[in-house]
Amino acid sequence: MIIIDINRQLKKGVLEIIVLKIINESDVYGYELIKSMENASDGYFSLKEGSLYPILYRLEDKGLIESYKNNFEGERKVPRKYYRITENGKEALNEMLKAYEELNKHVHMII
Amino acid sequence: MKREYKVYVNKVLSYIPTNHKTKKKIKSDLLETLMTREDEGMDVDPYEVLGDPREVAKEFSENLGMSMLNGGFEYKSKVSLIGVPLLHINLGRNATAKGIVAIGSKSVGIISIGGISLGVVSLGGIGFGVLAFGGIAAGLFSALGGVAVAYELAIGGVATAKSLAVGGVAVAKDIAIGGSVSASLMGYTQSINGENIMQAFRLPSEKAQFMTEYYVQFPDFGALKDTIIKAILNNGY
């Protein structure tokens, strides 16, 4: 139980950075983002919709990402919602990565 | 878009205690998730793909910074006064809300609304307060309810007060007005309890005599109670 809690807290702490990093590489839609995280981490970051979308809403509210609709060429009539990073988001991501490196370095000094 | 997707998503939304704007976003995103799976040629059953609607809603709620347990809902305002939140809503089973304004299954606050409520102004199935309203209401000053008990003023099906009781059954030390009454001064439509028949007046026929006796016995009864008595006699009886 304690292990599960720590795992969850550690993951939670870096999720915003990871999401922002992936969106920084290319515009993505929600499900694609879930798959990207899952594939890139060998299944370690396997997020459910209820965890991912609130992160996206927070990042959007902070102005770090923005969404837009893109018509999907196919049978589907509903356009797909993509997320892209903003200039503020790029700056914030750099700051976050620096903070993460700093944290990582100091944690390694102790552990 | 399949109707079952909308039904499923609406079910999820019904469990998420958030504003309309966020619900709209969640709806659009969940529908899109389902349709994306469908685009991949999968036979999509929302329950299999996303899971039990309550679990999905719970995860959204937790990550949106809300608490939603056992179908309940909790919200605490960030603004507080001497450590007490301005608004606390706690609707879980046996949950207690404590705030300046408290709304909950059980509630304690200045303004308290709940199944069982305690407050300055209290509204509840069972309400205790300075001013209490409820199925059963006990008020320090006044109570209004099915059963109302108060020091100054009680109005209800069964009402009892020290000062003024009005109701189907009204019992007071000073004045009782209603169907069946007991008090020092009584205005009744059906019956009186006790032997003080000289101070009992059948309404509406003896309204004038009741008022004359009222002015003699209680010349300083208080503006609010005075207004209530006049309003009741002029409109109710």
Image (spheres, coloured by chain):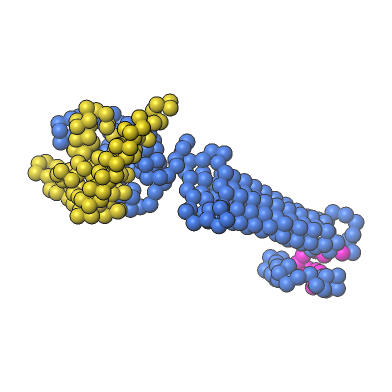
Chain colours: A yellow, B blue
Describe residue A63's horizontal placement relative to residue B143 as left or right: left
The residue under the point 40% across, 45% down is B65
Front residue of this view, candidates B41 and B107? B107
In percent of the image, x 15 and y 43: which residue is there? A25
Tell whether position B186 is magenta: no
Q: Position of residue B215 (x, y in %)?
A: 82, 73
Q: Quadrant of residue B62?
A: top left
Is residue B208 covered in magenta? Answer: yes
Q: Quadrant of residue B111?
A: bottom right
Q: Image check: B17 left or right of B155?
A: left
Position of A71 compared to A107: left or right?
left
Q: Which residue is the extreme one toward the left? A: A73
x and y percentages locating residue A42 in the rendered image: 22, 27
Q: Residue at x 36, y 32 (%)?
A: A110
Is residue B179 shown to the viewer in this render?
no
Asked if residue A109 can be seen in this view, the reply is yes
Tell me: B195 left or right of A50.
Answer: right
Q: Check the image and report above or below for A58 versus A6.
A: below
Magenta stretch bounds: B199-211
